[in-house]
C-alpha cells in the first residue's frame, strides 16, 4: 500500500533538508536509485516521487518549447556590462519556464554558458559572455541568480555549461584542450567559480572535448575543485550523447559499463543519453555494479545529488507549486531595454548619429527586414525588424540587397521552381536572344559568409531544401534545424559565372535526375550540373539605387545564426560575407550618410567600414524587440551604452591556432594580445563627450579602491562605463598586458560630473605560482589604468600592494612536469586514466623549461617519472636545450600509455640557480614528475 505523502519523512518541512535527503535515500531500492541517474528520471510512485527531467534550454529566454520571450543572445546581453540586467532577464526566463511546465519544461535549466570567449571563430561564440574570465563569471552568476531566484527554494536549478576548455566545434568530441596550470587557474576556472561559490548555479555540465587528453566528463576537477567550492550538493549532468563518446569516438574506455562506471566515480550524476529512452544506459550502470566497477556508495552519492536539487526546488514540500507568467507587457519592455542596452556604437564620425531632421531612411541588407532565431532561441511571439522599427519613426524604403539571379545551363535551359513544393526542374528556353522565361526561374542568392549561400524562390519565398531521395525543392522557411540542409557552396568552373552547386551539409552535388529534368543531389561529382549564374552583383546595384533616394542609408548586415558559425561549425575567418560587403560599399558610394548596423553573434573584421563608413554599430541578434531598440539608439532616445565584451581583430591572422588554448604562450585575448585590434575589449562610444578627472587609488588592507570624476562636457546625458585595469610591470613569468579588475556605470547630465568608484581585493592580483602550486601576489611594481576600454586609457596611477618574492624552484622538492614555465613541441596527457597530468613530446627535440632551479651546493642524483611506448631517453640539460651541459640522460623502458615508472641517474655539476630543460628526443615520451636528491 502506498503511504500517504504526509507520512513520508522527505515530505516533512519541519525536518532539516539533510535529514529529509537521508530518509528518502534510505527508502529507495538500488534499482530505484539507478533510475534517477538518467536525464529522464523514473517515478517512484510508492514514495510520491514524480517523473523528473533535466535539461530545459534557457540561454537567453525559454527555448524549444514554442513561443517565449526572446531576449538578445548571451554575448549581446554581456555587451550591456550590467549584472542587474542579466539578473532581471534570468528572472523573467525563470517565470516563463514555470509557465511552460504543461508544455514539458523541466525546472533544471541548462544555462548559463560560462566558457570564456577565447577565440571569436568559435561557432558558439554567441552563447558566451566575454573573453575576460572575471566578467564572464560576474555575468554568469547574475543570470544564474535570476534563474534561481532569491527565495529559500529555487525557482529553477541553473546549470553551468560547458566545463572545461571548450571553444572549438571542429572535431569537438575528439580534440584535446591543453590547459597548463596557469591557464587553468587564472583563465578557465575563474569563469565558473563565482556562480558556484554563491550557490546561484547548482549544477554543471561537462563539455564534449578532452582536457589534457582526458575526457572532460571524467575530469577530477569536478570533485577536486567544483564540489569543494559549491556550498551545497552539486549536480553534474552530461551533455547530450557525450557518455557514449567515452567508449565510442574517444575510445577512452573499452565498453559502456566501464566508461559509465568511470564517469560516475569521477562525479557524473545524470546521463543525457538516448533521449527519453533510459533503459540501455541504466542497463550499463547495472552491469557496472554487477562487475564490481561501481559500489552501492557510488550509486548513493549520485542519486543523492539528483534528489538534492529536487528538494531545493521545493518538489517535496507541501503547498502549491511556484507559478510563472509568459509574454507579459513587463517582459516585452525588458526585451526592448535589453536589446537597446546591448547595442555598441563602434564608430561615429561626421555627426551622422544620432539621426536628426531625417525624413526618409533607406534600410538595406539581408538582415534589414528579418529577425532571426538561433538554435537556443524560443519561438518569437512577434518580431520587430530594423525596417519596422524605423518605419514607426520615419518614412522608409527597403532593399534586401541580395542578388536576384537565374541559373542557366549549356543546353539552353533554366532552373525553375514550379511552386507548391514541387521539385526544381530544368525548363527549356531555347536560344533566342530574349527568351521567354518560365515562372519560378528567379531566385534570391543570399550570402551568409564562409562560402555558404542560400537560394530563395522569388515566386514562393521558400528556400531551396533537400526533400525525399535527395530531390531539391523550395520548401523551407529558411536555413534552420539541427542539420542545416539549405546552404550550398558555389564551386567555380569558369571564374565569375559558371558554377556547380554543392550542398554544404552532405557534400553532395546538384545534378539532373534520370528523367532529364528534376534536380537532385548526388555523391557523384561527375554528374554535377554546371550553371551560368546571371545576376551576380545585382543586389549591390539595386541597393545603391535605393540608398541614393534617402537622406540616410542604414545597412543591416551580419550573420545567420544557423549558418557558418554555430554549434558544430566554427568559422575559418572574420570577414563580412563578400556579397554583403559589396552592398555596403555600393551604398556608401551612393549615399555618404551611411550607417552600418552589424547584427551577429560574433565579431567581424570590418576594416574597410571602419575607414569609410561614418557610423558603425553592433549588436548580437537582439530578439523580438530588436527593431524598436535599434530605432531608440539611432534616433538618440536611448544613449548608446553597450561595450564590447571581446576584442574585434583586424584579421584572423592576429589569432592563434583555434585549438591552442594556452593563451599565455600564444598571446591570446586582450590579456596577452600585443597587436592593434580593430576595436578593443571594452570599446563603445556614446553621443556626448566625457572627461576623466582627479583619479585616485587607495589601498586599505586587502582592498584597493579607485575613484575618478567623470565630467560630461557635451549636450546630452552620458551613460559611461568606467573601466579599471591593472598591469604588473615585472615578473618571473609572462603576465597580462592589462587585466580588468572592475567597472562602474555612471549617468552624468550635461555640464555635470559624477564620481565613479571601483574596488577589488588584492587577491585578484595573484598569479598561479607553479613552483609552489598556489596563488601568489608577486612583489612587483604595478599600475592602475582607468579608461573607456582596454586601449582607451585616460589615467595611469601607481599601485603599491604587499607581495612576496617568488623563490627559485627548490631542487629538493618534486615538481609536476606540467608546471613548466615554457614548452616546445609538447602536449599534455593523462598520467593515469582517472587523475594526474603529464607532458608528452610530439617530435624529436621537444623540451620543457623549469626556469630558475636552485640546486644549492649541488645535488647527487635525479629521479624522473616517465613513460613511453618505445625505448626512449629523457635528458636534463642546463641553460640551453641545444647547447647546454647535460646533467643526466635517463633511459625509459617501453610500456603502455599509463605505464609511468621512476627512473634515476647520478648528477654532478649542478650548483646555484640555473635554468633546467627537460629534453625529450623520442616522440611519444611522457614525463609526469621530476625530483633531485641532495
Image: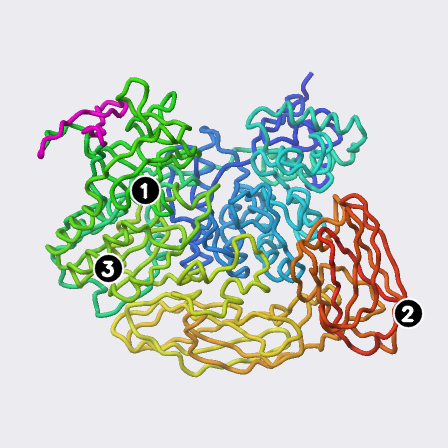
Quadrant for the N terminus in the image: top right
Q: Which is in the foreground here, disc 1 or disc 3?
A: 1
Left or right relative to 612: residue 380? right
Q: Distance between the residues labelled 1 and 3?
A: 33 Å
Q: Which of marks 1 and 2 is in front?
A: 1
The image position of residue 288, as x and y in percent, is 75, 29
Counting other residues with Cα less than 10 Å from the Cα at mark 2, is it few (<14), some (14-19), or many (20 or more)? few
Upstream in the sequence, badge 1 or badge 2?
A: 1
Task: Name the disc covering residue 10, or none.
Answer: none
Q: Mark 1 points at which residue?
A: 492
Q: Residue 860 carries which label?
A: 2
Q: Which of 927 and 429 is in front in this view?
A: 429
Reply yes or no: does residue 422 show up in magenta.
yes
Q: Is residue 203 in view?
A: no
Q: What element carries label 2?
A: loop
Circle nearer the viewer, 3 or 2: 2
The residue pinned by badge 3 equals 595
SS for tag 3? strand
Crowding around mark 3 (Cα neighbors within 10 Å: few <14, some 14 to 19, many 20+) is: many
Secondary structure predominantly adopted by residues drawn in magenta: loop
- For this rendering, which residue is in front, 857 or 370? 857
Name the foreground residue: 752 vs 710.
710
The quarter of the picture where residue 41 lies is top right
Tell me the quarter of the image containing the C terminus: bottom right
Q: Does the magenta stretch include residue 794?
A: no
Residue beneath the point at 26% across and 70% down: 716
Residue range of the region highlighted in magenta in the rendering:
410-434
Q: Find residue 56 and report its horizontal and vertical position in percent.
A: 50, 36
Q: Name the side, left or right, on which 143 lies relative to 398.
A: right
Local secondary structure at mark 1: strand
- Vertical placement of residue 654 versus 174, above or below: below
Amino acid at each position: 500500500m502506498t503511504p500517504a505523502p504526509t507520512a513520508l519523512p522527505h515530505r516533512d518541512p519541519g525536518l532539516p533538508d539533510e535529514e529529509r535527503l537521508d530518509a528518502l535515500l534510505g527508502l529507495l531500492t538500488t534499482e530505484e536509485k539507478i533510475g534517477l541517474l538518467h536525464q529522464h528520471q523514473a517515478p517512484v510512485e510508492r514514495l510520491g516521487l514524480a517523473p523528473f527531467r533535466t535539461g530545459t534550454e534557457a540561454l537567453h529566454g525559454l527555448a524549444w518549447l514554442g513561443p517565449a520571450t526572446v531576449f538578445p543572445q548571451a554575448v549581446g546581453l554581456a555587451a550591456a556590462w550590467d549584472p542587474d540586467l542579466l539578473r532581471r532577464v534570468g528572472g523573467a526566463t525563470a517565470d516563463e519556464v514555470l509557465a511552460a511546465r504543461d508544455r514539458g519544461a523541466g525546472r533544471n535549466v541548462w544555462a548559463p554558458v560560462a566558457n570564456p570567449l577565447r577565440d571569436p571563430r568559435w561557432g558558439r561564440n554567441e552563447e558566451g559572455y566575454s573573453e575576460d574570465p572575471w566578467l564572464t563569471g560576474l555575468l554568469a552568476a547574475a543570470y544564474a541568480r535570476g534563474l534561481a531566484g532569491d527565495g529559500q527554494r529555487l525557482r529553477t536549478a541553473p546549470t553551468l555549461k560547458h566545463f572545461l576548455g571548450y571553444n572549438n566545434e571542429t572535431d569537438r568530441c575528439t580534440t584535446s584542450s591543453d590547459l597548463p596550470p596557469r591557464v587553468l587557474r587564472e583563465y578557465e576556472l575563474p569563469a565558473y567559480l563565482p556562480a558556484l561559490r554563491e550557490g546561484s548555479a547548482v549544477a554543471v555540465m561537462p563539455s564534449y572535448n578532452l582536457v589534457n587528453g582526458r575526457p572532460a566528463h571524467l575530469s577530477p576537477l569536478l570533485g577536486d575543485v567544483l564540489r569543494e567550492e559549491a556550498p551545497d550538493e552539486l549536480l553534474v549532468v552530461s551533455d547530450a550523447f557525450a557518455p557514449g563518446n567515452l567508449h565510442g569516438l574517444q575510445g577512452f574506455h573499452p565498453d559502456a559499463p566501464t566508461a559509465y562506471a568511470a564517469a560516475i566515480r569521477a562525479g557524473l550524476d545524470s546521463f543525457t543519453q538516448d533521449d527519453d529512452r533510459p533503459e540501455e544506459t541504466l542497463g550499463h550502470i547495472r552491469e557496472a555494479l554487477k562487475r564490481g566497477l561501481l559500489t552501492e556508495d557510488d550509486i548513493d552519492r549520485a542519486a543523492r545529488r539528483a534528489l538534492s536539487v529536487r528538494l531545493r526546488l521545493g518538489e517535496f514540500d507541501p503547498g502549491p507549486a511556484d507559478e510563472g507568467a509568459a509574454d507579459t507587457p513587463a517582459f516585452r519592455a525588458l526585451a526592448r531595454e535589453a536589446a537597446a542596452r546591448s547595442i555598441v556604437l563602434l564608430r561615429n564620425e561626421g555627426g551622422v548619429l544620432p539621426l536628426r531632421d531625417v525624413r526618409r531612411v533607406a534600410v538595406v541588407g539581408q538582415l534589414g527586414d528579418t529577425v532571426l532565431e538561433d538554435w537556443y532561441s524560443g519561438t518569437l511571439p512577434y518580431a520587430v525588424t530594423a525596417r519596422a522599427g524605423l518605419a514607426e519613426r520615419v518614412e522608409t524604403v527597403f532593399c534586401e540587397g541580395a542578388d536576384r539571379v537565374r541559373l542557366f545551363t549549356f543546353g539552353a535551359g533554366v532552373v525553375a521552381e514550379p511552386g507548391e513544393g514541387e521539385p526544381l526542374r530544368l525548363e527549356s528556353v531555347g536560344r533566342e536572344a530574349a527568351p521567354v522565361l518560365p515562372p519560378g526561374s528567379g531566385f534570391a542568392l543570399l550570402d551568409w559568409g564562409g562560402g555558404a549561400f542560400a537560394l530563395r524562390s522569388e515566386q514562393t519565398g521558400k528556400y531551396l531544401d533537400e526533400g525525399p531521395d535527395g530531390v531539391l525543392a523550395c520548401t523551407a522557411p529558411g536555413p534552420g534545424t539541427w542539420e542545416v540542409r539549405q546552404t550550398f557552396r558555389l564551386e567555380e568552373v569558369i571564374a565569375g559565372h559558371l558554377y556547380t552547386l554543392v550542398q554544404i551539409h552532405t557534400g553532395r552535388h546538384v545534378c539532373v535526375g534520370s528523367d532529364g529534368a528534376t534536380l537532385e543531389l548526388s555523391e557523384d561529382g561527375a554528374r554535377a550540373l554546371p550553371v551560368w549564374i546571371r545576376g551576380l552583383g545585382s543586389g549591390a546595384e539595386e541597393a545603391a539605387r535605393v540608398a541614393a533616394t534617402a537622406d540616410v542609408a542604414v545597412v543591416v548586415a551580419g550573420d545567420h545564426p544557423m549558418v557558418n558559425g554555430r554549434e558544430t561549425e566554427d568559422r575559418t575567418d572574420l570577414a563580412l560575407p563578400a556579397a554583403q560587403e559589396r552592398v555596403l560599399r555600393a551604398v556608401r558610394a551612393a549615399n555618404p550618410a551611411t550607417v552600418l548596423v552589424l547584427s551577429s553573434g560574433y565579431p567581424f573584421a570590418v576594416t574597410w567600414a571602419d575607414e569609410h563608413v561614418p557610423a558603425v554599430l553592433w549588436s548580437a541578434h537582439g530578439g523580438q524587440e530588436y527593431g524598436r531598440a535599434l530605432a531608440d539608439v539611432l534616433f538618440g532616445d536611448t544613449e548608446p551604452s553597450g561595450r564590447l565584451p571581446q576584442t574585434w581583430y583586424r584579421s584572423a591572422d592576429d589569432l592563434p591556432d583555434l585549438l591552442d588554448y594556452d593563451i599565455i604562450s600564444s598571446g591570446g585575448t586582450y590579456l596577452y594580445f600585443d597587436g592593434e585590434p580593430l576595436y578593443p575589449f571594452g570599446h563603445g562610444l556614446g553621443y556626448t563627450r566625457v572627461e576623466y578627472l582627479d583619479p585616485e587609488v587607495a589601498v586599505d588592507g586587502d582592498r584597493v579602491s579607485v575613484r575618478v570624476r567623470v565630467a560630461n562636457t557635451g549636450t546630452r546625458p552620458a551613460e559611461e562605463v568606467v573601466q579599471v585595469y591593472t598591469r604588473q610591470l615585472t615578473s618571473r613569468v609572462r603576465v597580462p598586458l592589462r587585466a580588468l579588475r572592475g567597472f562602474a556605470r555612471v549617468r552624468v547630465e550635461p555640464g555635470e560630473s559624477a564620481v565613479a568608484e571601483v574596488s577589488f581585493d588584492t587577491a585578484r592580483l595573484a598569479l598561479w605560482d607553479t613552483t609552489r602550486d598556489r596563488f601568489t601576489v608577486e612583489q612587483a611594481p604595478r599600475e592602475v589604468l582607468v579608461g573607456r576600454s582596454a586601449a582607451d586609457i585616460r589615467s595611469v596611477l601607481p599601485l603599491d600592494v604587499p607581495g612576496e618574492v617568488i623563490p627559485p624552484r627548490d631542487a629538493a622538492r618534486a615538481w609536476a612536469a606540467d608546471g613548466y614555465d615554457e614548452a616546445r613541441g609538447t602536449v599534455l596527457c593523462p598520467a593515469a586514466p582517472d587523475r594526474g597530468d603529464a607532458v608528452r613530446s610530439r617530435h624529436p627535440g621537444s623540451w620543457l623549461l623549469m626556469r630558475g632551479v636552485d640546486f644549492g651546493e649541488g645535488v647527487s642524483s635525479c629521479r624522473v617519472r616517465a613513460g613511453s611506448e618505445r625505448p626512449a631517453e629523457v635528458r636534463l640539460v642546463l641553460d640551453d636545450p641545444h647547447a647546454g651541459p647535460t646533467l643526466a640522460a635517463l633511459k625509459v623502458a617501453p610500456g603502455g600509455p599509463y605505464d609511468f615508472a621512476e627512473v634515476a641517474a647520478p648528477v654532478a655539476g649542478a650548483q646555484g640557480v640555473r635554468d633546467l630543460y627537460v629534453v625529450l628526443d623520442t616522440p611519444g615520451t611522457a614525463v609526469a614528475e621530476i625530483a633531485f636528491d641532495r
